[in-house]
Amino acid sequence: MKIAFATKDTVHINAHFGAAKQIDIYDVNTEGYTLAEAVTFGGNLQQDGTHDKLFPKFEALKHCTIVYVADIGPGAAARLINKNITPIKPSEENAAIADVLDHLVITLKGNPPPWLRKALRRDVAPSFEEVYVEIEEEVTV
C-alpha cells in the first residue's frame, strides 16, 4: 500500500496539501516501509482559489491509499475522497513521519480498522471465488 505525506522537511507532516512543495510517498506493508518517491511541485502554490495547482498532486497520489497533511481545504479533501484516497490530519502538530509509519505497520500486523481493511482490499485483485460469487449473485434473481 502506498502512503503519502505532505512535508517541508521530509521528517515531519508539516505542509498544507495545496501549498505543499513536496509529497513523500512510501510503500508500506506488515514488514515495514520504504520511501518509494519524493515528488516536488513548483509554481505559485500559495495562491488560494487556484485549483490548477492541485491537479499534479492528484496525479502523483493516484496509487496512494492515504495522504497525511498538516491541513487541507474541504474541496481538495472531497476530491481526494472521490478518488479513494483518504486525507488524514494527525492529531499531533508536526507529527514525525517515521512515528506515523511505525504505528501504521503495527496496525497492519494487528487488526486494522474497517476503513483501512477496505483500502487494503482495493490494492489486491479479487480472487476467482470472490468474482464468481459476485457474478452468481448478480445473475440469480
Image (cartoon, grey):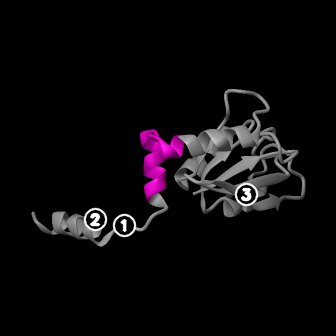
> Alpha-carbon distance for marks 3 and 1?
28 Å
Span colored in magenta = 107-121
Left or right of 112 in this view: 94? right
In the image, is residue 111 part of the stretch drawn in magenta? Answer: yes
Residue indicated by mark 1: 126
Mark 2 lies on a secondary structure that is helix
| Residue 75 seen from this side | no
Q: Which mark is residue 68?
A: none
Residue indicated by mark 3: 57
Mark 3: give few (<14), some (14-19) or many (20+) Cα within 10 Å: many
> Alpha-carbon distance for marks 2 and 3?
33 Å
**Disc 3 residue type (three-letter):** Lys
**Disc 1 residue type (three-letter):** Pro
**Residue 122 image offset from top left, x and y in percent:** 46, 59
First in residue order: circle 3 vs circle 1: 3
Mark 1 lies on a secondary structure that is loop
- Compare residues 50 and 74 and report the one nearer the observer: 74
**Disc 2 residue type (three-letter):** Glu
- Compare residues 128 and 137 and report the one nearer the observer: 128
* Mark closer to the observer (2, 3): 2
Magenta span: helix, strand or loop, mainly?
helix
Left or right of 110 in this view: 138? left
